[in-house]
Each structure stands twice: as structure tokens, then as C-alpha cells.
Image (cartoon, rainbow, N blue to C red):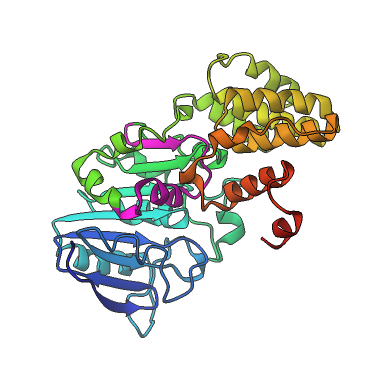
Amino acid sequence: MPSELHDQILSDFALLRVRNSKRLVVALSGMNTAPGRYSYYSSFAEAECDTLLLNCPDNGWYFGGLPFAKAHGDFDLKSTLSFLERIVARYDQVLFVGGSMGAYGALLYGAHFPGAEILSMSPEIYPGIRRGFVIGNCRSAELPPNLSRLFAKPDFNPYIIAGEKRYSDLFCLSDAPLQRTFALRNAQHLVPVVLHRYLGALGKVVDPIFSGDLGKILRPLAGNLLAYPEIVALLYLMELGKIPVARARDQLGIIPPDNYLRGYLALLISEIHERTGQKDRALEFARMARDANLTDLPAHFAHDRLTLELEGAPPEPIWRAYQTDHFTGQPLYDSCVRDLMLLHGDLPADEALTG
């Protein structure tokens, strides 16, 4: 068992949890975390490491720095990195980790420390990207800078993980090297939740990262969408409405019939047909999406809902065989499960309304 942790409050935006380890995990909180609170307070409590928990004022995406003193004075990125240098110097091994806004911060701060490891989960490397979180949530006067320049450094090789169903996140990885970049099949934006459920605790990534074995652990979760950057671009541009549905159907014919990626594209085509009132075509492509990617519950819901609407009764609920425990806890996934249960009469309507 790891030794007891002792908390040292540095400011409303920085907390050091010490057990006198020679490893340090710098964990950067995600957006909308209140001052004095931290996204990963307990995540690394069982890992053999000290933990420096950081939060960012005003959803600032960390590029403006953060205060490290209880009496907040002026602060900027330079002073923040200088303070981090003094803390990091005490340790033999250092890992910067974060998700979403924290993922951006982990790349930005971690790049300053040669030899440090980085785990960046769903980073928005292009902060101005449409359908991303930065534009609607960053409350700083300026947008954070594009981080693609970091990947021009030959020694910069972070671990990056994103969900395949968040196409804007994958589009942001165009400049990232593939050796340590992973996309989780059917996952959305909240990668830390998936890893916590899959591993039992997010802190269980620490040893594999320092040993170089994280890729082996992620292999059962990983998909192959990153191997097809042209499909990533197609899916993202379709979400933006920049690809006509007829052209998207032509592209669907290029993807091999046994490749589950057909399901992602077919589901987007189905959604477009439904929005334009072509329910029969929508059901056709929803069925194709479900059959190509049976572990994607949103495809099941689209198919079963349209079947009920057009044929008067839902199909057999085969979705149950493909429910995945490690996605539980993600709002979009949990909502889809509830919708499927309600559609198939497994959840009382009043419970669905109050749940």
C-alpha cells in the first residue's frame, strides 16, 4: 500500500499531495472546476506518486498561467512555468496528465520539461475548431494558441488518447505522431471516465506510462480510425454540413464492407436523411450503421427508434448484448442506454422523466 498522503494548499488553484515519492503526477483539471476543487483529487491516491493538482481560473485553458500563492498577485505563463520548475526539480520521474481543457494544459506545460511524460486525453490542439469546447467555454480575452507547433519538436512524443465518436477531437490530431496516439472505439470526449471504468482507477496508468506499456493496456479499447485520416476529415466535415449527402454515400462505397468505420459514416448519413424527412432512407442507413458497428449503441437506438416509428413496433432488442460497462458514466452513453430501455419498455416513463 502507498504511504499516507499529506495535502499542501498552495493556492485556490494548486494543491500538492505529498507522500515523499520520487515520482510526481501533475494533474490538470478540466473546465468548470470551482476554485479549491480539482478534477483528479482521488484519481492517483493509490498510485505510488506525489500529485500536484492544478486548476485554471475562468476556464482559461492554462495558457495564461495560474496563481501559485494564496494571496493572488499577477501571474502569467512564464511565472507559472518557473514555479513548476522548482517543484519538478525534486522528482526523478514526472507525468503531466489531463482531459479536455486539462489535456491542452498537459501538452502546453509538459512540453516545457524534457524527459517528462505526458498523457493528454481529448486535447483540442486547434482551439478554434468548430464543434469544439474552447470557443463556447474559454472565458479569457483571447483564444488559446494552436499547439500543432509542439509536434515539430523531434523529441516531443506525448501519449494522446481521444474518443473515435468525437470527430472534432480526432481532426485535431492531424499533426500528432501516431506511435503513442490512440483513438478509443465508439468513445466520446470523456476519455478519463472510460479509463477509470476500464482500469478500476485512472491512477493505474502511471506505471504503464513510465514502463512504456500503456499501448498494450489500451489495445482492447482502441479502434483503427486514426489509420484513415481521410475518413476522419470526411466525418468532421459532414458534421459541419460541408459534404453533400450524395457524395458521402459515394464515399461509403469505398470503405470495405467488413470495416466497422462504415457504421460511423452510415449513421451520419441516416441523421441527414431524417432531418430532411426521408425516414425510409434514414432507417436504411441506420440499419447499415448498426450492422457494421454492433457495439455502437447510438446506432442501435437510431435503428430501433426509426423501426418503431415506421413499422409500429420495435425490433428485437439485440443492443443488450453489446452494452459496454467501461462507457458507463458518460452522460451521452448513459442517456442512450436509458432511451433504449424506454423504447423497449424496460424503463417506466415516469422514471425516465425523473431520472
In the image, is 164 to the left or to the right of 208? right
Query: Based on the displayed image, in which of its 4 quarters is residue 176 positioned?
Result: top left
Query: Based on the displayed image, in which of its 4 quarters is residue 337 positioned?
Result: top right
Query: Based on the displayed image, in which of its 4 quarters is residue 256 positioned?
Result: top right
In the image, is 164 to the left or to the right of 94? right
Percent coordinates x, y for residue 91 in the rendering: 15, 61
Percent coordinates x, y for residue 67 in the rendering: 37, 75
The span picked out in magenta is 179-203
Q: Is residue 126 visible?
A: no
Instruction: Tell me: residue 258, above or below residue 129.
Output: above
Instruction: Tell me: residue 226, above or below residue 336.
Output: above
Q: Nearer the viewer, residue 155 or 331?
A: 331
In the image, is 229 to the left or to the right of 314? left
Percent coordinates x, y for residue 268 in the rendering: 68, 32
Instruction: Tell me: residue 323, above or below residue 278.
Output: below
Magenta-colored stretch includes residue 180 = yes
> Can you name the residue that lies furthest to the bottom here?
71
Q: Is residue 113 visible?
A: yes
Quadrant containing the N terminus in the rendered view: bottom left
Q: Residue at x 46, y 71 (%)?
A: 57
